[in-house]
Image (cartoon, rainbow, N blue to C red):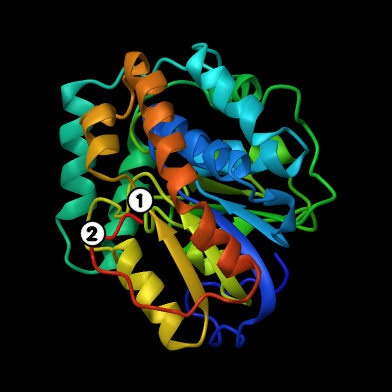
């Protein structure tokens, strides 16, 4: 993947004047909130096509791909309100406990991600083909990489290293998005480019890394921190701001967190979560316009800042 800094590589290039839309992961419920934010922004006058790059992890990869392929934010939002784009994830208590043990038993981010990836490789779940079928459904009619720049985050299962895909990587879009959505121990690691990958949010729920070369970033992330010893989105935003990047970070506010609840797979919470996101997006539109117009002054966000 060209021009995208990888873990253990040389330092990321200094940011330029381009803008990036960074979409985080958060399961079906978090994804619903995300579509609401995007629709609220668009409805209040933010032209999302002005962003030079779209990046996504997990649910953000799904909706980022659809948005970059020309589907409107309003259409994505309306489908959530109508109960469309449904996916049923039956997560057992045993899977949850194994996930938590693998993800959180080390204090080192690289080791924690490697533990989680290896646990995913050893788990008995479903065939990869079922993941690909589910992701095809979630992508609607989108099958090919869009002409608009799009970067998809994933984590290599065997090493825990962060990686990613774009249209020049030689990986079909469906495989790239499926790799980014491969929830460890619930879905199997997905093969793409000759390697196996787990959920792009396993090390960072917000794929800032894929936009490090862009000087203005809007990050919309339903879950601001990944499980385990990984940096909070606000910390990552502060680090970027220190490098001269203008960052606007949107995470669920108190009302949205109440609407979303604790179970990010609960389909009956998607409509209310989307509506809460729409309200947040509408309220944040002026500051996002300032970011796009180059008028925003970088200001380090507080740890639980939600816009």
Q: Quarter of the image for the N terminus: give it.
A: bottom right
Q: Looking at the image, which is closer to me, 283 or 189?
A: 283
Could you tell me if residue 126 is visible in this image? Answer: yes
- Residue visible at 28% across and 53% down in the picture: 115
Q: How far apart are marks 2 and 1 (CA)?
A: 8 Å
Element at label 2 = loop
Tag 1 residue: 251
Q: Quadrant of residue 68?
A: top right
Q: Position of residue 300 (x, y in %)?
A: 34, 77
Tell whether label 1 touches label 2 (CB within 8 Å).
yes
Q: How crowded is mark 2: few (under 14 residues within 10 Å), some or many (20 or more)?
A: some
Which quadrant would the C terminus be assigned to in this image?
bottom left
Q: Which residue is rendered at x = 40% and y = 33% of the image?
A: 27
Q: Pick whichever of labels 2 and 1 is earlier in the sequence.
A: 1
Q: Residue 307 carries which label?
A: none
Write down the residue under mark 2: 304
Q: Residue at x 74, y 51 (%)?
A: 49
């Amino acid at each position: 993947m060209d021009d995208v800094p990888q873990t253990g590589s040389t330092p990321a290039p200094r940011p330029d004047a381009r803008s990036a839309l960074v979409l985080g992961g958060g399961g079906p419920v978090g994804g619903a909130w995300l579509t609401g934010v995007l629709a609220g922004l668009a409805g209040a006058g933010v032209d999302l096509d002005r962003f030079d790059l779209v990046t996504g992890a997990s649910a953000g990869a799904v909706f980022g791909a659809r948005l970059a392929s020309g589907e409107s934010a309003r259409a994505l939002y309306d489908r959530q309100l109508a109960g469309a784009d449904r996916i049923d994830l039956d997560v057992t208590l045993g899977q949850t406990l194994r996930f938590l043990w693998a993800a959180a038993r080390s204090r080192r981010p690289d080791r924690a991600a490697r533990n989680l990836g290896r646990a995913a490789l050893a788990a008995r779940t479903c065939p990869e083909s079922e993941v690909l079928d589910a992701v095809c459904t979630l992508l609607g009619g989108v099958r090919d990489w869009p002409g608009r720049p799009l970067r998809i985050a994933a984590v290599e299962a065997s090493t825990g290293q962060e990686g990613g895909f774009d249209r020049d990587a030689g990986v079909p879009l469906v495989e790239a998005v499926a790799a980014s959505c491969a929830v460890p121990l619930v879905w199997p690691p997905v093969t793409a480019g000759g390697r196996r990958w787990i959920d792009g949010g396993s090390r960072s729920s917000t794929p800032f890394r894929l936009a490090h070369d862009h000087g203005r970033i809007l990050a919309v992330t339903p879950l601001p921190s990944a499980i385990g010893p990984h940096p909070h989105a606000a910390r990552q935003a502060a680090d970027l701001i220190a490098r001269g990047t203008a960052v606007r970070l949107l995470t669920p506010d108190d009302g949205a967190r109440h609407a979303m609840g604790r179970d990010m797979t609960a389909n009956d919470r998607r409509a209310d979560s989307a509506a809460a996101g729409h309200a947040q997006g509408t309220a944040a539109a002026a500051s996002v316009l300032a970011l796009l117009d180059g008028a925003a002054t970088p200001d380090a966000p507080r740890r639980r800042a939600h816009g």
